[in-house]
Image (cartoon, grey):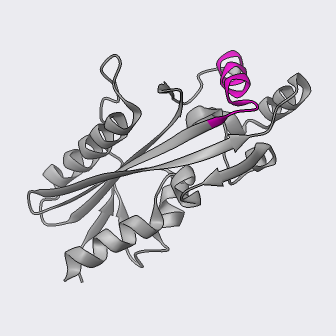
Amino acid sequence: MREVILASGSPRRQELLQLVIDHFEVCVSDVDETLPEGIAPRDAVEMLAQRKAQTVAELRPHALVIGADTVVAVEGRILGKPRDDEQAAEMLRMLSGRTHQVYTGVAVCEKNKSNVFSCCTQVEFAPLSEAEIDWYLSTGEPFDKAGGYGIQGYGARFVKGISGDYFNVMGLPVNRLYTILGRIDK
C-alpha cells in the first residue's frame, strides 16, 4: 500500500479525502501564501496547492502528496479568510444577492511528478440583511473560511443555488481527485 499524505490541516479536506482514500497521513505544509498582485483566482489556487504539496513532497519523496487551496472570487477579486469582524462583514455584503466563484486548486505530487488542476463552482447568494450578517458573524463561522462563509455550516442558509461541484466549495473537488488518483494507479 502506498503512502499518501495530505498537505493540509483543514478538517474539511481531511473529511472529504476520506471519501476517496481510506488511509492517509496529514502533514501541514507551512508555506508562504503571499500571492502576486493581480493574479487570477485559478492561477492563485493552483500555485498555492503546488507550493504546499511540493514542500511536503521534498520531505517525503516516496509518498504521494496532495496539496489544495481554495479561494472565493467576486468579479475576479480574490477573497481570502477574513481577519476580523469588519472584513468578514464587508465580504458578506459583497456576496449578498449575487453570484460568485469558488476555486479550488489541487496538486498531486509523486516521484518528482506533479498533476495540478483546479475546479470552479458558481455560487449564488440570497440578499442578506445587516441583521443576518451580524448574526452570522456572532457564530464565529466566517473566520477560518475563504470568502467568510462555510457552505456546509450556517452559511448554507444564504446559498440560493450552485452550479458545479458542491465539494469543491468545501475545499476539495472529490470526483475530480478520485478520477485523477485512479489514473495514477493504472
Identify whether 66 is placed above or below 186. above
Q: Main secondary structure of the magenta part?
A: helix
Q: Residue 115 at x, y = what percent?
A: 21, 57
Q: Point out the stretch of residues depicted in magenta.
A: 86-99
Rendered-image quadrant of the N terminus: bottom left
Q: Position of residue 74 (x, y in %)?
A: 56, 28
- Left or right: 157 as drawn, with respect to 29: right
Up-down: is 34 above or below 72? Answer: above
In this view, the residue in front, 92 or 134, is 92
Counting every numbered tag in the picture gives 0
Classify the position of the C terminus by image quarter.
bottom left
Which residue lies at the image location 73% right of the left edge and 23% below the top edge?
93
Seen as rendered, the residue at the extreme right is 131
**x, y percent for residue 19:** 49, 74
Left or right, residue 24 beside residue 110: right
Answer with left or right where residue 123 lies relative to residue 78.
right
Q: Is residue 180 above or below residue 103?
A: below
Task: Looking at the picture, tell me which residue is in the foreground, 43 or 111.
Answer: 43
| Residue nearer the viewer, 57 or 185 | 185
Residue 175 covered by magenta stretch: no
Q: How far across and down, in percent of the image, does residue 46 sit?
A: 31, 43
Residue 55 appears in view: yes
Viewer can see residue 30:
no
Residue at 68% from the left image edge and 35% from the top image edge: 142
* Residue at x 30% of width, y 29% of height: 32
Q: Quadrant of residue 34?
A: top left
Q: Can you tell which quarter of the image residue 141 is in?
A: top right
Image point (69%, 19%), residue name = 90
